[in-house]
Image: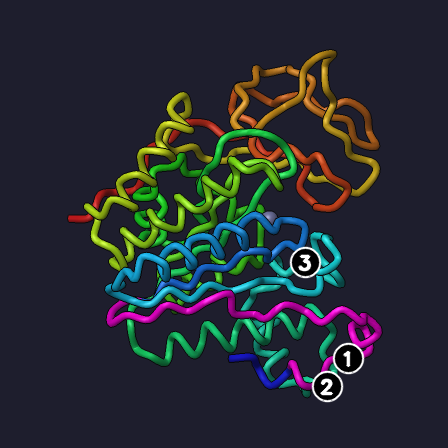
Amino acid sequence: MESKSQASAPSTSSSDPTPLPERLIDRIDGDGPVLIAVGGLHGNEPSGIVALERVCRALREQGLTLKGTLVALRGNRPALAKGQRMIERDLNRVWSPLILEHLLRRDPAEDDTTDQEMRALWWEINAAKESGRPLFLLDLHSTSGFGPPFCVVLGNQPSQRLAASIGLPCVHGLNESIRGTLAEWFSHGYGASMVAEGGKCGEESTIRHLEAVIYSAMGTSGLLGEEHDRVRTARQLLQQATEEIPHHVRVFYREPASGVDFVMGEAPGRRFQNFDSVRQGDHLARNRDGAVFAQRDGYLIMPLYQAEGGDGFFLAEACEGPPTIP
Ligand SMILES: [Zn+2]
């Protein structure tokens, strides 16, 4: 199932003596829709991969017959091997039709590792599309700061409905400030997609949340019945983990980050978390120009507590969910 490009690895990775793990974690076949689940698109976020491994193992041990196909994939394997968010470029900021068109026209021998990973993922997704079956994409992430799990909705209405069904708070409006995500690209022409943020990187609770997200998405996409024990238990767990939070919020502010110039500004004893309620004028961070204050009341989304990444934090406010399915 590997793309041909794997055979022509450029010098950037050939010096690494450790063989990369397989792209495919597992593929469990059934007649019906295809759910593609990707973990580790950011190499410092392996929790999604652990969750996928656990779910696939459990499904096989129980011998469950799925009413569709689950394809579980590793994202940025060279970055995962190094425990870094990315190697050359962020593999979750490169998915534009133009970049992809250039990539597919070019000789794979010229690929750097980001190109190789993108080419191979495109190959997997396109192979699924050629099956002619309905497609869903689940992109599993974790955050550098603490906080509850949530969904990020980057696609169109089917994607909004998929995210709204999972049992987690949904963050809307990030596609206006984050470009080139796999989920948004997928939603144009492939199928419904969503991003799940399971909690802080590496926490056991994060892995459990992401396992629950996978089962919940299997219910929505039709691979398991909505009344299946695994689906119901998963949704209960996710709802319990996020009881205090509005179901839908929309981002109204993005604070950019540029390396060492940005640091979340913590008042003594306070460390910000996802979905922390902040008030207008609260001191949230520092950048090269000095202190950064909250523009107005809102919820803090994805405060940056790592050196890598171009987004310092986002502010969001409660909003309406998507229209329900007629
Ligand atoms: Zn991520």
Tag 3 or tag 2, which sits nearer the N-term? 3
Q: Is residue 16 magenta?
A: yes
> Distance of mark 3 from mark 1, alpha carbons?
18 Å
**From the Cβ of disc 2, is ligand 1 less than 8 Å away?**
no
Kind of residue at badge 2: Ala
Q: Residue at x 22, y 43 (%)?
A: 324
How is the structure coloured here? rainbow
Q: Nearer the viewer, mark 2 or mark 3?
A: 3
Report the residue at 78% width, 34% height from top. Answer: 262
Residue extending furthest toward the top = 268
Please give the residue where the numbered disc 1 appears in the rendered image.
10
Near mark 3 (Cα within 10 A), the count class, few <14, some 14-19 or many ≥20, is many
**Which range of residues does the magenta coloring cover?**
6-33
Which residue is disc 2 drawn over?
A: 109
Q: Which mark is residue 80?
A: 3
Label 2 to label 1, Cα distance in Å? 7 Å
- The type of residue carrying mark 3 is Leu
Task: Provide residue 294's location: percent of width, then percent of height.
Answer: 62, 22
**Taking 49 as reference, is 217 left or right?**
left
